[in-house]
Amino acid sequence: MRWWKVLGVAAFVGVAATGAAIARAERQRRAYTPDQVRDRLRERLAQAEASAGPEVDVPEQGESAPGRLRRLLGRARALAGRIPARFGREVDPQG
């Protein structure tokens, strides 16, 4: 058998194996009910919020736009004060 025949057979086997793996993954994906998908998404959201920590900006109930802006500016000033000197000049957090 010549080398190009062996290469052709190997390529055919590889394509078939890839197709089988994709078909199996698709069957597993479609096996979820909408409720299961919703639950998994909620779990992932909870994990993302937990790992984000206090840096997540969630508006408070009934908070006005100016109040939210004032809170965001205060957070930006606090973060600016923590910038190390190697990134530029020292930043005064008060303005």
Image: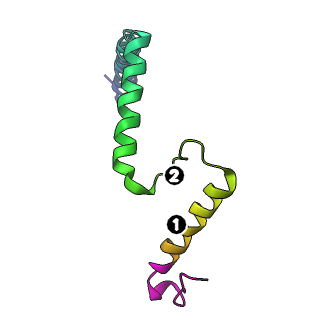
Label 1 close to label 2 by CB (< 8 Å): yes
Q: Residue furthest right?
A: 66
Q: Which residue position holds label 1?
A: 75
| Residue drawn 62% across the image and 63% down it | 70
Which sits earlier in the primary sequence, circle 1 or circle 2?
Answer: 2
Q: Which residues are magenta?
A: 81-95
Residue 36: give x, y in percent of width and height.
Answer: 37, 15
Rendered position, 46 above or below 50: above
Three-letter residue code for mark 2? Asp
Question: Is 15 placed left or right of 1 in the picture?
Answer: right
Label 2 residue SS: loop
What scheme was used to colour the molecule?
rainbow
Question: Is 64 placed left or right of 44 in the picture?
Answer: right
Q: Which residue position holds label 2?
A: 57
| Residue drawn 35% across the image and 30% down it | 43
Q: Per the image, is 89 magenta?
A: yes
Within 10 Å of disc 1 (Cα), the crowding (few <14, some 14-19, many 20+) is some
Quadrant for the C terminus in the image:
bottom right
Three-letter residue code for mark 1? Arg
Quarter of the image where one finds residue 94? bottom right
| Residue drawn 40% across the image and 44% down it | 49
Quadrant for the N terminus in the image:
top left
Rendered position, 19 above or below 88: above
- The secondary structure that most of the magenta stretch takes on is loop
Within 10 Å of disc 2 (Cα), the crowding (few <14, some 14-19, many 20+) is few
Residue 39: give x, y in percent of width and height.
Answer: 37, 21
Residue 87: give x, y in percent of width and height.
Answer: 50, 83
Rendered position, 61 above or below 88: above
Quarter of the image where one finds residue 13? top left
